Amino acid sequence: MEYVYGIALMLLIVIIIKSPIGKGMFGEFVLRTIMGKNKPKKDTFVIHNLTFYDGTKSLEIPHLIVNSYGVHIIETLEDNGVITGRETDKTWSKKLWLDQNTYSIPNPIKSIASKTLSLKSVMLKKAPIYTYIVCTGRVKIKVETHDVPVLYPRSLMHKMRHIKKTEQSLKPMDVRKVYEGLKNLKLMNRIGHKEDINLNNHNKIYQKHRP
């Protein structure tokens, strides 16, 4: 009987992983694994699920990496099928694997551009910002882009390593200031200090409510 239960459990796991939701969850897990954890000695810091208030509304960015190159904003596309479109399109087209119909989905580049502008407006320590769309579902990408890469999780770090250093590269102290400032934004949104988002009192609020 235990043998039967074991087989049933394995089949259930396979079904979940093969499903669109399971593919998205697995892709998200792979992405987080690739991004890794904070590496202070290498001036690299990771933030997941950054929620912040831009003065009019609360926004969420799924993933960020802060390093000597700047801030890397990562928007995830959890979907399935063949996705086509261009960077400037308002919507992209999606064709499911076993469906002849074509569906429209919002262009995630538009969303990440809006969030980037909002984040820039409330960052006390300025830094170069780079944006990426990472597909975590069972997706085949046929998208034409120029400024914002649309890629799979395994290609993210390779793409980041090929960013050329410029005169704007951050010093180690500045990397930490940017990272702490982003954490402050998240904390201030959570504890309800939205009215103070544009003031120079981030550190006081952060220290007072720090876990």
Image (spheres, rainbow, N blue to C red):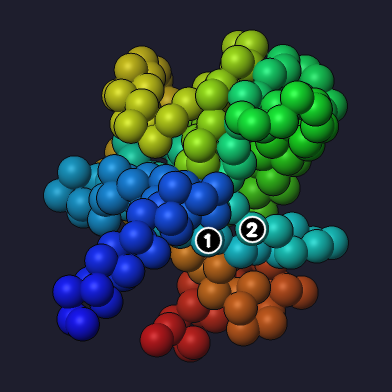
Q: Relative to 24, does residue 210 appear above or below in the rendering?
A: below
Residue toward you, 178 or 30: 30
Looking at the rendered image, the quarter that the N terminus falls into is bottom left
Where is residue 209 shown, x and y percent of the image?
A: 49, 87
Residue toward you, 117 or 173: 117
Q: Are marks 1 and 2 in contact (CB under 8 Å)?
A: yes
Q: Amino acid at mark 1?
A: Asn
Q: Which mark is residue 60?
A: 2
Identify the residue at image location x=29%, y=63%: 10
Where is residue 74 shown, x and y percent of the image?
A: 51, 41
The quarter holding residue 108 reads top right
Is 20 placed left or right of 12 in the picture? Answer: right
Number of other residues with Cα within 10 Å of mark 1, as a class: few under 14, some 14 to 19, many 20 or more: few
The quarter holding residue 57 reads bottom right
Where is residue 63 shown, x and y percent of the image?
A: 48, 50
Identify the residue at image location x=18%, y=44%: 42
Looking at the rendered image, the quarter that the C terminus falls into is bottom left
Q: Which residue is mark 1?
A: 49
Is 161 placed left or right of 70 in the picture? Answer: left
Query: Which is more N-terminal, label 2 or label 1?
Result: 1
Looking at the rendered structure, the number of numbered marks drawn on it comes to 2
Is 206 placed left or right of 190 in the picture? Answer: left
Q: Amino acid at mark 2?
A: Glu
